Image (cartoon, rainbow, N blue to C red):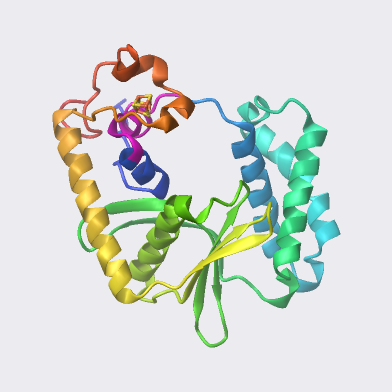
Amino acid sequence: MSTPLPRPLALSPSRANDYQQCPLLYRFRAIDRLPEDKTEAQVKGTLVHAVLEEMHGWRRDERTYPAAVKRIRPAWEKMCAEDATCADPIADEMELFVAARELIRGYFFMENPAGFDSAEQEMYVNAVLPNGVPVRGFIDRVDVAPTGQVRVVDYKTGKKPAPRYSATAQFQMRFYALVYWRLTGVLPNQLRLMYLKVMDSLFLAPSREELEYFERDLGDLWDKILADGASGTFRPTTSKLCGWCPFQALCPAFGGHPPAYPGWPGSAAD
Ligand code: SF4
């Protein structure tokens, strides 16, 4: 039986962010694919996204706060049945359910889901941009107004960053706006990040020129990744974020030794 070919690499907002923070962190995650423990925040975010996705598939009159809250436990049980490691970072299930309920309450405070139907939820995108950059990811929600105006929505279950730290969030929104535009030919009119915890949103309205610049910057970033991928360089770049890096013990900047470079996926070095 032949060994399946590794999945070709593609840029997602998270992996682009990793490379911009530290090329070695990108390598560990995207190429070595080193295992990482789930965090409580990740699990909570996945649970709330699952409930909101399910709810947007119901009839309008069914989309109520109590009905959504009732789906927290079944969504959690489904998550754990599909991946038992989801439960690992959760010390107290009831605390998780209460936190998820508060986030869903925040969602209902911000908009009324009975007033519109979303066009897409958890939209999987996997494409190659015209400049050759492969991109992949999930768009939480896409709304299309009767006028044809398009809104791309992303739910955030963590804190809302101070304006000077919002670059990562804006990068993610521009990324999905660009991908949606290139896939459908329709430029989104609005990007909305919904911070459910603080019941506040971040809005962007990208112009065509802005997304063209962004696309060019993504092309430059992908070229750097490809160059590192060919040489295996992926230099460590320290910052205060190293304190949250799960691979510090393997990092040469902290006296560690990375595993041998496995080569670019799909290349002769595999
Ligand atoms: S510890 Fe810091 S420098 Fe080392 S891999 Fe992690 S993020 Fe990069």
- Eyeballing the image, is 57 above or below 124? below
Report if residue 230 is visible in the image. Answer: yes
Residue 169 to residue 244: above or below: below
Image position of 227 (left or right of 211): left
Horizontally, residue 101 falls left or right of residue 28, namely right
Hey, which quadrant is residue 56 in on the image?
bottom right
Residue 237: x %, y % from top left: 30, 30
Q: Is residue 67 left or right of residue 236?
A: right
Look at 60% across and 63% down and name the residue there: 201
Q: 183 or 220, which lies in front?
A: 220
Q: Main secondary structure of the magenta part?
A: helix
Q: Looking at this view, is 193 or 112 the one in front?
A: 193
Q: Residue furthest bottom?
A: 147
- Seen in the image, is 172 located left or right of residue 69? left
Residue beneath the point at 36% across and 67% down: 183
Q: Position of residue 205 (x, y in %)?
A: 44, 73
The residue closer to the viewer here, 185 or 155, is 155
In the rendered image, residue 22 lying in the magenta stretch gets the answer: yes
Residue stretch in magenta = 21-35
Residue at far right of view: 66
Quadrant for ligand 1 reads top left
